[in-house]
Image: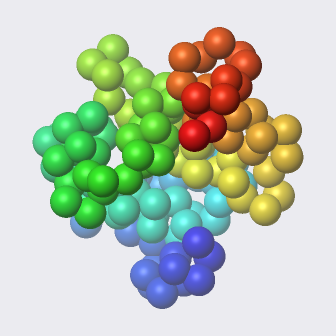
């Protein structure tokens, strides 16, 4: 992510469609991303959100680039949602941060396990792995 963020130039500000600096710094502190990386993720998130400010199931299922990808749908399904069933940007960033090189391995493994535990039984059945 670092090289992509670096290509984006200076961090955005709230006045030009970016995040407020205070919000950026909060996410930097919570995730370990740089401000430029948070801004890059925000731009990507906004590009995915076709129906509003938050990522909906319809945004995923109706995007021609994502339609056939079962893992993208499953990833959406395991992320925490708001009261309307949408993923907020903070959740999106926190999920991505689980896979930073410095992130604890147990968090990565737990998240990946949940991707395959379709029935959320805390066990992986053979049919969940096929």
* Residue 33 showing in the rendered view: yes
Q: Is residue 46 left or right of residue 98?
A: left
Whether residue 86 is situated above or below residue 17 in the rendered picture: above
Of residue 102 and residue 111, the one placed in the foreground of this image is 111
Left or right position of 95 against 21: right
* Figure check: 26 above or below 123: below
Determine the residue positioned at 30% across, 53% down. 68
- The percent position of residue 96, horizontal first and vertical second, equals 58, 51
**Residue displayed at 71% across by 16% down:** 122
Q: Residue at x 23, y 43 (%)?
A: 61
Nearer the observer, 117 or 40 = 117
Front-lying residue, 97 or 66: 66
Residue 21's x, y, as percent?
A: 47, 55
- Give the residue displayed 30% in from the left and 40% down from the top: 55
- Protein image colouring: rainbow
**In this rendering, is residue 54 above or below 8?**
above
In the rendered image, is residue 17 in sight? no
Q: Nearer the viewer, residue 80 or 129?
A: 129
Q: Position of residue 58 (x, y in %)?
A: 20, 38
Q: Quadrant of the N terminus?
A: bottom right
Screen quadrant of the C terminus:
top right
Q: Is residue 96 left or right of residue 91?
A: right
């Amino acid at each position: 992510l670092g090289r992509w963020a670096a290509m984006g130039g200076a961090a955005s500000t709230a006045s030009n469609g970016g995040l407020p600096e205070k919000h950026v710094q909060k996410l930097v502190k919570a995730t370990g991303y740089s401000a430029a990386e948070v801004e890059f993720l925000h731009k990507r998130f906004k590009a995915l959100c076709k129906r509003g400010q938050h990522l909906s199931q319809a945004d995923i299922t109706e995007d021609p680039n994502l339609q056939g990808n079962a893992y993208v749908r499953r990833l959406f399904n395991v992320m925490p949602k708001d009261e309307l069933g949408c993923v907020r940007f903070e959740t999106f960033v926190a999920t991505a941060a689980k896979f930073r090189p410095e992130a604890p391995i147990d968090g990565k493994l737990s998240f990946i396990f949940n991707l395959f535990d379709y029935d959320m039984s805390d066990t992986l059945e053979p049919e969940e792995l096929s």
